[in-house]
Image (cartoon, rainbow, N blue to C red):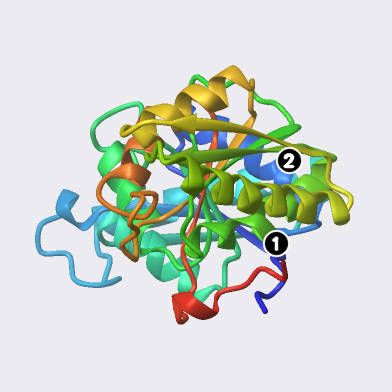
Amino acid sequence: MQKDFQIKRILIPYDFSETAGACLNHAVHLASRFSAELFLLHIIETSTFPGLIAHAFSGFEKKAEESSNEKLQELAEQLTREHGLKVTILTEAGKIYKRIVHVARQAHIDLVVMGSHGDAAGSYSAGSNTVKVVQECSCPVISIHPNTPFTDFDRIALPIDDSPESRQKVNFAMEIARKFGSSVTVIGLTTSSNEDYLRKFRIKVEQVEDFLLEHGIKSDSVFRAGEDIAKNTLEAARELNASLLVIMTEQEPSLSGLLMGSYASKIVNRSTIPVMTVRPAEVDPDRITVTF
C-alpha cells in the first residue's frame, strides 16, 4: 500500500530574482496550509568561482556567503513575522541542480517549489536546472512559470494512462485537494483507437474517479486521444482552467509514453500552469496499488 503523502518540509531554491519571488508566494501559501517548515536555499554556483572546492570560502567568496545569509535571514524573519512560519536558511556552493537535490535529500524535504523558467540564463529556474531537479529529486517538485498569477490550487488536472505507475500520482493529488478544497479532473490519455481497449481503459479511469469521490474529493473525468500526449495534456489542462497539473517523472519506461522520452520535460518547460511532478516508487509494477 502506498504511504500517505504528507508535507512537513518545503524547499525553495532562492536566487533573489523576480521568478524566485513569485515561487515564494506559492511556497508560503503551501507551507501555511500544511503547517510546514520552509527552507530557503541560496546557491553560489562553483563555476562562478574557478578553483572553489566544496565550502572552503575565502575572500570574495566568503563575503558572498555572508551577504546571502544576511539577506535570507532578513527574509526569514519577515516570513515568520507575517505568516507565523518556521523558516530555515541555507547557503550552499556547487552546481545548482546537484545542490538542490542534495539538500532535499539531506534535509528530508517533502516538496520542492521552484520556477520553470528563469529571469536569466544563470537562474536557478532556467529550464535545464528545473528539469534535472525534476528528474533526480526523490520528492515531488512543483514548478511554476514566472507569468503564472498566484491562485489557490482549486482545480487539479490529473492525467492518467493505462500503466500501473501512472496511478501512483493519485494520493499526491488527493492530499493537495484535501488541503485546498480542490476538485480533481482525471484526464484519460490514450494513443489507441481500439474500441475494446478504450472500454476497459474508461473503466480504469472511472475507478480513479470513484476512489477520489470515496475520499471526499469532488471529481470528474475527460478523455483525450492522440500520439502527442504532452500536447493533449496541456490542452486539456488549459481547457479545464486547471490551477495545478500533476504528472509523473521519467524514471521508468511506459508503453503509453507518460513515463517515457521527454514527456515530463515538455510539460515542465511548456506549461503556464503550475506542474507537480511525482517520482514513481521503486517497486514491482505488477504489484503497484493506490488502495483501489
Could you say whether the residue bearing mark 1 is in a helix, strand or loop?
A: loop
Up-down relation of residue 46 to residue 231 (above or below): below
Q: Residue at x 56, y 32 (%)?
A: 223
Of the pair 73 and 257, the residue shown nearer to us:
257
Name the spot of residue 163 as percent of width and height, x first: 46, 59
Horizontal side of 56 relative to 75 (left or right) equals left
- Whether residue 287 is visible to the viewer of this picture, yes or no, is yes
Q: Quadrant of residue 220?
A: top right
Horizontal side of 209 relative to 285 (left or right) equals right
Q: Residue at x 65, y 50 (%)?
A: 203
Q: Quadrant of residue 149?
A: top right
Residue at the extreme left of the image, as rendered: 50
Number of marks in picture? 2
Q: Residue at x 60, y 64 (%)?
A: 110
Horizontal side of 64 relative to 204 (left or right) equals left
Label 2 Cα neighbours within 10 Å, binned few <14 / some 14-19 / many ≥20: some
Name the spot of residue 225 as percent of width and height, x first: 43, 32
Q: Residue at x 55, y 40 (%)?
A: 188
> What is the C-alpha distance between the residues marked 1 and 2?
12 Å
Horizontal side of 108 relative to 150 (left or right) equals left
Could you say whether the residue bearing mark 2 is in a helix, strand or loop?
A: helix
Of the pair 202 and 31, the residue shown nearer to us:
202
- Whether residue 78 is visible to the viewer of this picture, yes or no, is no
Residue beneath label 2, please? 29
Mark 2 belongs to which amino acid? His
Label 1 Cα neighbours within 10 Å, binned few <14 / some 14-19 / many ≥20: some
Of badges 1 and 2, nearer the viewer stands 1
Name the spot of residue 234 as percent of width and height, x first: 46, 28
Residue beneath label 1, please? 7
